[in-house]
Image (cartoon, rainbow, N blue to C red):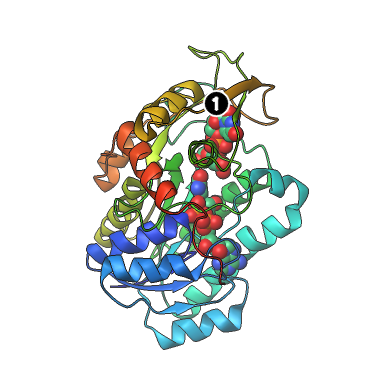
């Protein structure tokens, strides 16, 4: 089965390509490299020991996408291409809606033209907003708080509408919790542009000496130690969730939504401790004001993912930190930037 991976050069995409190839899928990648480097794909090819056709294409460029679909008879799409910085989405909503929502419309249109009706889409736990209860089930109330989150919700609704009018589609909407970690080889991992927004990339750059100290955003949340709690999931487990979704979609046309999380929440202070243990480095930190828009606590109920796609996260927190550390310490400045 030939799978087009949009955003396949990115953090989650590169790991997903490897798991897809391991499971016997043929992979083709489109990515405009706006937040990634071709080097990640070069390394994926080494790790997967096979060639991966790559197209430097923007998902908003319909004629270019059509060319890719003409060249390869694509059976399904794993759609990860998109912009993901919450803060930037507040400043540049048009850019976010154009790329995330507009790009998805164009991609889907092209899929229809080629009668390709299988898609796995990367949604996010951000669609739950500030959850009223945890663990969060798929039918918990939805409330996105920023343009990024709303773009994900709109796309989810768009795909539900598509299925409502044409029930021959096979659609998986995956709500990721907080992906961290890296491939065991240390060859591929998360490579944010500039100063990282997310906790683990920030901590790992402190550990490696690139940043001086971590600011812990808020020490007065209603959580056991006052700091924010999240469901961190190993990116390889997450990648395997895409394989399992495609396998589940094979059974029959359907649309489903699943949480991809571990079901366990860890606080910022617990994450610092775990990372210190994995890296054997001290992480200096100070507690500062809360970050605007942050929530106290968020972790998944992963029961339905087990039922629906026979998937369960396997990696524990220590391995997530060890693998992040291996990637960061072997690649001090991430991938070489020759785009
Ligand atoms: P990433 O930025 O590493 O990967 C996204 C990839 O898409 C990049 O390689 C980028 O160059 C590419 N891209 C962006 N706009 C494009 C366009 N117009 N045309 C073609 N390619 C384009 O991010 P990631 O962490 O791997 O995230 C992948 C997906 O998962 C995104 O849709 C993101 O919103 C979603 N997601 C990520 C997280 C997370 O915490 N990392 C959480 C929930 C959901
Ligand atoms: N945090 C700090 N200091 C930092 C960065 C983060 O204390 O420098 C704290 C946050 O306040 C939060 C926790 O660490 O309590 C995790 O923050 P991240 O920024 O790593 O992750 P978020 O849960 O805020 O958001 C991420 C993605 C979203 C996605 C969400 C759920 O950025 O896009 O996970 O998948 F929607």
- The answer as to whether callout 1 falls within 8 Å of ligand 2 is no
Image point (48%, 74%), residue name: 111
Q: Is residue 80 left or right of residue 255?
A: right
- Relative to 51, say whether 136 is above or below: above
Q: According to the image, label 1 marks what residue?
A: 284
Task: Give the SS element for disc 1.
Answer: loop
Residue 334 image offset from top left, x and y in percent: 50, 56
Image point (42%, 35%), residue name: 232
Residue 10 image offset from top left, x and y in percent: 48, 60
Marker count (numbered): 1
Quadrant location of the C terminus? bottom right
Closer to us: 269 or 117: 269
Residue 268 image offset from top left, x and y in percent: 50, 25
- Displayed quadrant of residue 221: top right
Q: Residues within 10 Å of mark 1 (few under 14, many from 20)?
A: some
- Displayed quadrant of residue 107: bottom right
Residue 161 shows in this picture = no
Q: Is residue 204 left or right of residue 2?
A: right
Residue 235 image offset from top left, x and y in percent: 38, 47
């Amino acid at each position: 089965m030939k799978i087009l991976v949009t955003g396949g050069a990115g953090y989650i995409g590169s790991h997903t390509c490897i798991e897809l190839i391991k499971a016997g899928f043929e992979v083709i990648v489109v990515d405009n490299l706006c937040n990634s480097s071709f080097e990640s794909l070069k390394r994926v090819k080494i790790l997967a020991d096979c060639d991966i056709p790559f197209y430097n294409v923007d998902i908003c460029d319909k004629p270019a996408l059509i060319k890719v679909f003409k060249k390869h008879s694509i059976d399904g799409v794993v759609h990860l291409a998109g912009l993901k910085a919450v803060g930037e989405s507040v400043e540049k909503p048009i850019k976010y809606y154009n790329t995330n929502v507009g790009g998805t419309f164009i991609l889907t249109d092209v899929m229809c033209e080629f009668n390709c009706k299988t898609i796995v889409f990367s949604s996010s736990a951000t669609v739950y907003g500030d959850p009223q209860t945890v663990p969060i089930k798929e039918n918990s109330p939805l409330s996105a708080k920023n343009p990024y989150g709303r773009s994900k919700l709109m796309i989810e609704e768009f795909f539900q509408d598509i299925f409502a009018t044409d029930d021959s589609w096979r659609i998986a909407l995956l709500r990721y919790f907080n992906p961290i970690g890296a491939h065991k080889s240390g060859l591929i991992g998360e490579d944010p542009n500039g100063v990282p927004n997310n906790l683990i990339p920030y901590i790992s750059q402190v550990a490696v000496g690139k940043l001086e100290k971590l600011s812990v955003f808020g020490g007065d949340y209603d959580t056991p130690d006052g700091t924010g709690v999240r469901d961190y999931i190993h990116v390889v487990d997450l990648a395997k969730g895409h394989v399992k979704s495609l396998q589940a979609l094979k059974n029959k046309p359907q649309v489903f939504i699943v949480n991809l999380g571990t079901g366990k929440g860890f606080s910022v202070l617990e994450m610092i401790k775990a990372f210190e243990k994995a890296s054997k480095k001290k992480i200096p930190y100070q507690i500062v004001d809360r970050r605007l828009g942050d929530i106290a606590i968020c972790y998944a109920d992963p029961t339905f993912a087990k039922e629906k796609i026979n998937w369960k996260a396997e990696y524990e927190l220590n391995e997530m930190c060890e693998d992040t550390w291996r990637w960061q310490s072997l690649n001090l400045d991430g991938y070489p930037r020759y785009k």
